[in-house]
């Protein structure tokens, strides 16, 4: 994996790529982000952050997670959903990092488990059984580190709950318990992923007998939603 941070006019350019011998330059780019310079009137302590009213929310326990058929699994840090609510066409979730992992907040101002759950809950389950996976953020604004207890609001932007949509886009607002905004994410886009089917014969010959099929996510052309797809990945015998 190659991560680069390049200085460009007005800020920095970040890219993430992995080695791919089939490409002319030997690398496949998976993600890029532009990091603009912070304006001089922004306060680093987040005291200029906006606030959102938390009144009128009818909180309820989250529904049990259904069994997954897409091969994805999550560790104990991701077991942080506490309550759900709806208001004004938005979905809300209240999160709390398990106390065992509180000490990690000092090292991870944007704790990956909290950030992932704060965004991932936005898309409702797909009735057809398809899987929607994160594809892009349009813009992220950070006012301060994520606390151990976070409230996230997801507002549908494009294709939110449309059963026929191949992409779903949401605007997210992450808050502390007082309603102070700690982060805003515009254009959080997920794309429906269709399985590519069974492992090919050549892959099956290299796979461990009886082992479940591995799959990997491939970006055929960086920036193109229609190039994102699952592909078989052989599970080789150890040694």
Image (spheres, rainbow, N blue to C red):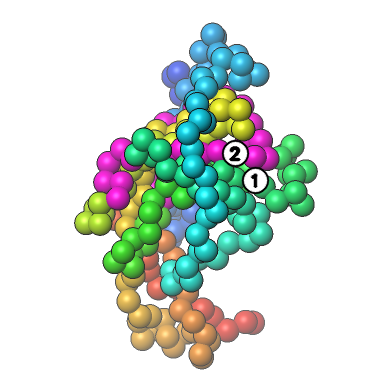
Residue 125 on image: x %, y %? 38, 59
- Is the residue marked by circle 2 packed among few (<14), some (14-19), or many (20+) residues within 10 Å? many
- Is the residue marked by circle 1 packed among few (<14), some (14-19), or many (20+) residues within 10 Å? some
Q: Which residue is mark 2?
A: 150
Marker count (numbered):
2
Left or right: 75 as drawn, with respect to 56: right
Question: Residue at the spot x=47%, y=74% of the render?
Answer: 214
Instruction: Indicate whether 105 appears above or below 232.
Output: above
Q: Which mark is residue 96?
A: 1
Left or right: 226 as drawn, with respect to 186: left
Question: Residue at the spot x=44%, y=65% of the render?
Answer: 216
Q: Nearer the viewer, residue 121 or 104?
A: 121
**Does residue 42 appear in the picture of this structure?**
yes
Does the magenta run of residues contain 235? Answer: no
In magenta, the rendered stretch is 134-161
Question: Residue at the spot x=43%, y=69% of the render?
Answer: 70
Residue 175 on image: x %, y %? 55, 32
Identify the image quadrant of residue 69.
bottom left
Quadrant position of the C terminus in the picture:
bottom right
**Does residue 24 appear in the picture of this structure?**
no
């Amino acid at each position: 994996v190659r991560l680069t941070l390049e200085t460009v006019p007005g800020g920095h350019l970040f890219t993430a790529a992995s080695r791919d011998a089939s490409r002319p330059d030997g690398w496949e780019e998976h993600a890029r982000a532009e990091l603009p310079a912070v304006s001089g009137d922004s306060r680093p302590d987040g005291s200029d952050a906006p606030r959102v009213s938390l009144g009128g929310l009818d909180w309820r326990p989250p529904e049990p997670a259904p069994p997954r058929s897409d091969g994805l699994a999550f560790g104990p840090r991701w077991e942080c959903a506490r309550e759900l609510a709806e208001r004004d066409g938005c979905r809300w979730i209240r999160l709390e990092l398990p106390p065992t992992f509180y000490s990690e907040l000092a090292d991870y101002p944007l704790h990956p488990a909290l950030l992932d759950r704060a965004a991932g809950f936005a898309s409702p389950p797909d009735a057809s059984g398809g899987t929607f996976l994160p594809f892009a953020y349009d813009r992220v604004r950070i006012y301060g580190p994520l606390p151990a207890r976070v409230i996230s609001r997801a507002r549908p932007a494009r294709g939110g709950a449309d059963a026929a949509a191949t992409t779903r886009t949401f605007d997210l607002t992450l808050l502390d318990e007082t309603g102070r905004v700690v982060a805003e994410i515009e254009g959080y886009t997920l794309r429906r992923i269709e399985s590519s089917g069974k492992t090919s014969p050549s892959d099956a010959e290299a796979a461990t007998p009886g082992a479940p099929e591995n799959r990997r996510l491939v970006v055929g052309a960086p920036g193109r939603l229609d190039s994102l797809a699952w592909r078989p990945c052989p599970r080789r015998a150890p040694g």
